[in-house]
Image (tube, rainbow, N blue to C red):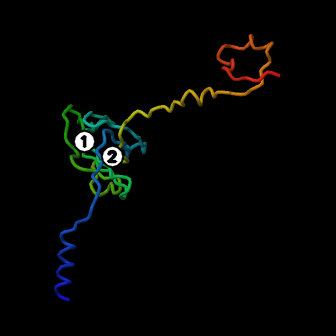
Amino acid sequence: MMKKTGIFLLTLLTVGSVYAADIETNQVLLRGVDKVTGRTSTMTADIGKPALFGNLTILVQKCLKKPPEETPENAAFLTIEEINRDGVQDVVFNGWMFSSNPALSAMEHPIYDIWVLECMTETPVPQWQPPESVVKPLVRHQKVDIDTLDDLPLEEVPSDEFLVD
């Protein structure tokens, strides 16, 4: 019995949980609030490109999201700098922010709040083009009046199969 329990525990220790890899994205959806005016703004920021909010410069360095089969979570590594009155940029936040729990790693600022909503991938959505047979269905075995056959445009003239009364 002791041997079976030992083997079972050893098996549990060696077999780890299997998790899918995080999905790296190229954009992040952020929400900012100006605490003085109470205005909120939702903005999209590209990875590696600075975004402006008030006198803050937000640089997103990485954005990861969990795969759909796991608990939803988005995490972005942000560097947020404030341009002060002298024109000097001071770093006010540098670290990871999480969409599921913004207070876990929040930016401390007297005027602005910034938090991550979602990591996104900007990919063009292809427009569905129906096949030609769906756009112009072939009509076979239709009744055609011989006298009006010459008046029809060429596309509407039935091919070799038509019925004549």
Mark 1–mark 2 CB contact (< 8 Å): yes
Question: In percent of the image, x 28 and y 47: which residue is there?
Answer: 76
Helix, strand or loop status at disc 1: strand
For the residue pair 139 and 55, the one nearer the viewer reads as: 139
- The residue under the point 26% across, 64% down is 17
**Disc 2 marks which amino acid?**
Ile
Q: Is residue 88 left or right of residue 40?
A: left
Res. 85 image quadrant: top left
Quadrant where the N terminus lies?
bottom left
Tell me which residue sits at (19%, 40%) in the image.
90
Identify the residue at the far right of this view: 165
Q: What is the three-letter code of the residue carrying label 1? A: Ile
Q: Quadrant of the C terminus?
A: top right
Q: Which residue is mark 2?
A: 114
Q: What residue sits right under mark 1 in the picture?
A: 80
165 versus 153 height, above or below? below
